[in-house]
Image (cartoon, rainbow, N blue to C red):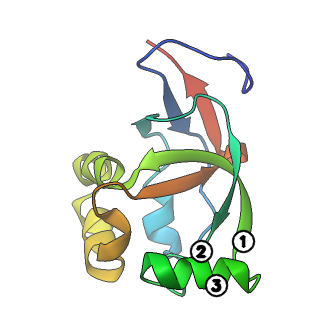
Amino acid sequence: MRWGEVSKAGTKIRIISVPPGEAPPWVREKWVGLELPLTRWVSPKKFLGFGAVSGPRTCLAQLWAAFMGRAERIYGFPVDANRAVEILEVASPEAASWWRENAPELILPKRYLIFHAEVCEIISK
């Protein structure tokens, strides 16, 4: 399936290479091979994002930082952060624990992790 194609419900992405980011390399490596459900879009979109460690912690602070030009432009897929860490926990409890200890505000309900399009492969049921 190509990135621009729309699919039925149940579409997922498979992480095919180590995603960039601020989490330690050993944590980012644990995403490889995991299948994560897409909840909003089945094709990559442009987003403004922040580092998991260095980024602003509140929505208001993120809006201000984006306004000030401190956000990173990311072309990728948003994945429900809480669900993604639950899936990660099955493969690596240690990596999931890192997220819960170092970026708990990023894995709250209605929060998303953005995975760069180049490290993802679209799969469907």
Q: Is residue 84 left or right of residue 55?
A: left
Q: Are marks 1 and 2 in contact (CB under 8 Å)?
A: yes
Residue located 35% across and 54% down the image: 110
- Please give the residue where the numbered disc 2 appears in the rendered image: 50
Crowdedness near tag 1: few (<14), some (14–19) or many (≥20) residues, C-alpha within 10 Å? few
Mark 3 or mark 2: whose residue is earlier in sequence: 2
Q: Picture coordinates of residue 81 (x, y %)?
A: 37, 55
Q: Is residue 20 left or right of residue 75?
A: left
| Vertical order, 82 against 73 (above or below) | above
Task: Kindly report the distance in space between the C-alpha atoms of the residues bearing marks 1 and 2.
Answer: 6 Å
First in sequence: mark 1 or mark 2? 2
User: Visible in this render: residue 3?
Assistant: yes
Tell me if mark 2 has few (under 14), some (14-19) or many (20+) residues whose alpha carbon lies within 10 angstroms of its own: many
* Residue behind mark 3: 65
In front of the other: label 3 or label 1?
3
Marks 3 and 2: CB-CB under 8 Å?
yes
Q: Is residue 55 visible?
A: no
- Whole-angstrom CA distance, mark 3 to mark 2, is 9 Å
Residue 100 image position (x, y, % from top left): 26, 72
Per the image, the residue denoted by label 1 is 72
Kind of residue at disc 3: Ala
What amino acid does circle 1 point to? Glu
Q: Nearer the viewer, residue 14 or 84?
A: 84
- Amino acid type, residue under disc 2 in the picture: Phe
